[in-house]
Image: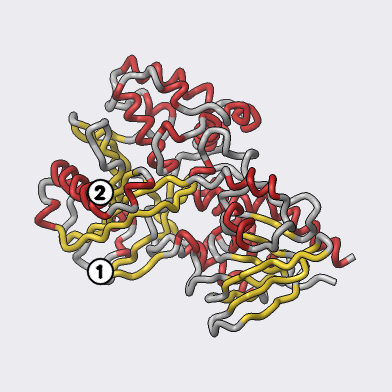
Amino acid sequence: MSLPTIIIGAGVGGLTTGALLAHDSHDVIVLEKSTKLGGRTASMKFKNHILDNGFHIMPFYKKSAIFTILKNLGIESRLKLAKVDDIAFYATTGFHIYPKGMVDLLRLSLIPFKSRIRLLKLLLPLAFSSIEKTELWDDIPLTKITHDLDADTNAFFEAVCMLAFADTADHISLGEFARTIIRANPFKGGTSEFAYPDGGGYDSICHVLGDFILEHNGILKTKQSVKKIIIKDSKVTGVVVIDSLNAKKIIPTNSVVVSYPAYTALNQLFEKNIINLKFIEKINKLNKTTSVVEVHFALNSQIDTRQVVFPVGKDYVTKGIFFISNITPSVSPAGEHLIIAGTPVSSDDTEDSRKVQNIVTKMKEEISSIYPKFNSALLWERPMAWKLVESVVKEPGKVWKSKMPHQIPGIEGLFFVGDSTISYGIGTDSAAHSSILCHPKIKSFLNSLIK
């Protein structure tokens, strides 16, 4: 007998999986420990501005895994999107247009013409490779091919890595970088377009998916903390939940989808000896993060009409300036403008308030050097220091098929999705791609219960 599938977590991974199952007429219950949907994409209202938990962007726009799922569900029109295409570099020589394709590299004024030719020779073979071939490069760091490039060309790679991975080039796998270039290649059906919800708040994606689940008789419950997945005779039989009233209950089920990092779930949700210790140790090695300091700034005037600016060069602490109100005015009240600036840092830095403040001060100095009107326009600032950017999606040796599998051999009815599991890309798009890959496995299992 088939019971409702329990999905733990209402982020992009859990909700895309739940929506796909609901679309196939399977019963689903999504349990979220927080008070709202969104997971790591959760947004909030602060002084009448919509603030995201960091800067999020939909890569590859209509070719993205998220958009593919929305289209397959027939609800892509529900998510109004604003294109993010006015992107520039900033160097000591001024502003330089960010290239949107291979041909644009020839017009890349940031670097000398000879360097542009060399850059094309590096990128073209990557852009026309196969996904299968890139898997052979997953253990190779990106810096293997960039270490002897000139400073300006290396600055270009750093800016691309900041936009695509929210990290520095030395943390990126050559295989993951190549897959990104392939997905942006229009000659292979890709696109370099980016998008952001026009209504503001990246968690709009999750609300659209949540509404779809409810419309298809699914159940969404917040403030529900799953404490244990019950396994008997190598089969899932239920979950133990603490609800919003702090009451403990057991929900019977024969299928569970875990949609938050697998290395956390394996250590929290199972009794001892259920999961092989060597397997847990292997997955625990994936538990590495990229730490980030990001600051939201509210301004009383517009200091730039561009949407994204990347300061390039080793002297800049600030690696990205994102003009959210220029992408969509919906995030801010009339007459005010919202930007967010960010930079990767060491994990230790995020735990030292003095270091964080020094970084924020340096970022403000850099922004004001680029935009002299910044200080006089500044209304307030809201710094964040966190470790939530998963490096397992891109670090050499820990990407694509080297990550957590969607199933654990020998346990029936247990599935894992999200950006810590087998998938490519980064963050939300990786989580959605994981759902696409895992969905046939879950569907096949549920159909076998009906027979």
Q: Could you tell me which residue is drawn at 53 percent across and 43 percent down?
A: 392
User: For the point 36% across and 20% down, which residue is it?
Assistant: 116
Dot 1: what SS? loop
The answer, for residue 391, to whether it is visible in the render is yes
Q: How is the image coloured?
A: secondary structure
Residue at x 18%, y 43% (from the top left corner): 366
Q: Are marks 2 and 1 in contact (CB under 8 Å)?
A: no
Q: From the viewer's perspective, is 253 left or right of 74?
A: right
Quadrant in which the C terminus is drawn: bottom right
Q: Quadrant of residue 415?
A: bottom right
Amino acid at the residue labelled 1? Pro
Q: Is residue 366 above or below residue 235?
A: above
Q: Residues within 10 Å of mark 1 (few under 14, many from 20)?
A: some
Left or right: 306, with 228 as reference point: left
Foreground of the two, 285 or 155: 285
In the picture provided, is 103 more to the left or to the right than 26?
Answer: left
Label 2, residues with CA under 10 Å away: few <14, some 14-19, many ≥20: few
Q: Residue sitting at 28 percent across and 36 percent down?
A: 89
Tell me the element at label 2.
helix
Mark 2 lies on residue: 355
